[in-house]
Structures are given as C-alpha cells and as structure tokens.
Image (cartoon, helix red, strand yellow):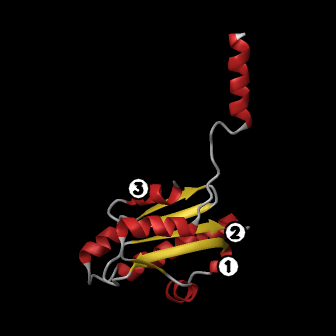
Amino acid sequence: MKKIIISLIAVAFLLTGCGKRKLDINYDTVYNNLKTEYKDFEKIDKETIEGTYGVDLSKFESYMVVMEEDAAVSKMYAIFKYGSNKEDALDEANYFVDQYKAAWDNGYFPSETALVKKGMTYEEDNYFIYVVNSDPDKVCDLITK
C-alpha cells in the first residue's frame, strides 16, 4: 500500500511538472515592489527606448525599462518578453544592453561606469532581464518572485 501511495505521488509530480512554474511577470507589481525598495525609479517610454537605444520594441511581446530619475546614476532594470521569434528578440535585447553600456562608457562617472560593466543579464522562460544595480541578484529575485 505504501508503494502505491508513493507511486501516485510521483506520478502527480510528473504530471504537474515537478513543481516548476511558468514565469509570468506582472509589470505593475514588479514596478511597485522595486519602487518601494529603491525609490527613485521611473518607467521609460517607448519613444525614449527606441530613439535613445535604437531598439525595435516590436520584437517583444511586452517590455518594461525602468531607470533612476537622476541621469547621473546608472542603476536600472529592463524586462523583455520574447515575441514570436525568440532569436530576433534576444538579439534586440542584447543590442539594448550593448547600447546602454556604450552610453555610460564616456568616463564622466567612473563609479557608475564600473557598475554598468557589472550589470547582469538573466533569461528565464520567455523573458530576458537586464539589471544594473549593486545587488543584481536581489533585484532579479524581486522581479521573478
């Protein structure tokens, strides 16, 4: 009887994906959580992202880019949900990262440039996440929780 119960539990785990969850980021919740934790962030609009960084946002199903309100501070995070063509979207997300790094590679703010160079990228499910922060893993955890 014990073996039957254990077998049924094992089958249940297999059918439900062994506890894996599909990531579904709610941008408003993430923004509010991070705004509470880090205060001076603002969402960046589509025109600014496309115009400043040359990113084609049509490659993504959805996105959110949030940066410090103070233009002399490099902390930011970006979340891109892949569109129908993951490869094209991934290329575009990496292009954004490259452009963001290049924008800070001017030598005016050495400590901020160093922080940008330590920025982290994460991929999970259909999401690409880029974080520039002194504790990027903590920010990523806040985004994906």
Pick the residue in front: 121 or 27. Answer: 27
Above or below — where is 49 with respect to 24? Answer: below
Marks 2 & 3, CB-CB < 8 Å contact:
no
Q: Which mark is residue 83?
A: 2
- CA distance separating discs 3 and 1: 28 Å
Query: Does dot 3 land on a helix, a strand or a loop?
Result: helix
- Between disc 2 and disc 3, whose residue precedes? 2
Displayed quadrant of residue 28: bottom right
Look at label 2 and name its amino acid. Answer: Gly
In the rendered image, which residue does mark 1 sit on? 58
Above or below — where is 12 with respect to 26? Answer: above
Marks 1 & 2, CB-CB < 8 Å contact:
yes
- CA distance separating discs 2 and 3: 25 Å
Q: Residues within 10 Å of mark 1 (few under 14, many from 20)?
A: few
Look at label 1 and name its amino acid. Answer: Ser
* Residue 92 in view, yes or no: no
Residue at (42% x, 60% y) in the render = 139
x, y (%) of residue 65?
Answer: 51, 75
* Residue 57 in view, yes or no: yes
In the rendered image, which residue does mark 3 sit on? 137
Query: Does dot 1 land on a helix, a strand or a loop?
Result: helix
Q: Residues within 10 Å of mark 3 (few under 14, many from 20)?
A: some
- CA distance separating discs 1 and 2: 8 Å
Marks 3 & 1, CB-CB < 8 Å contact:
no
Above or below — where is 18 with respect to 118? Answer: above
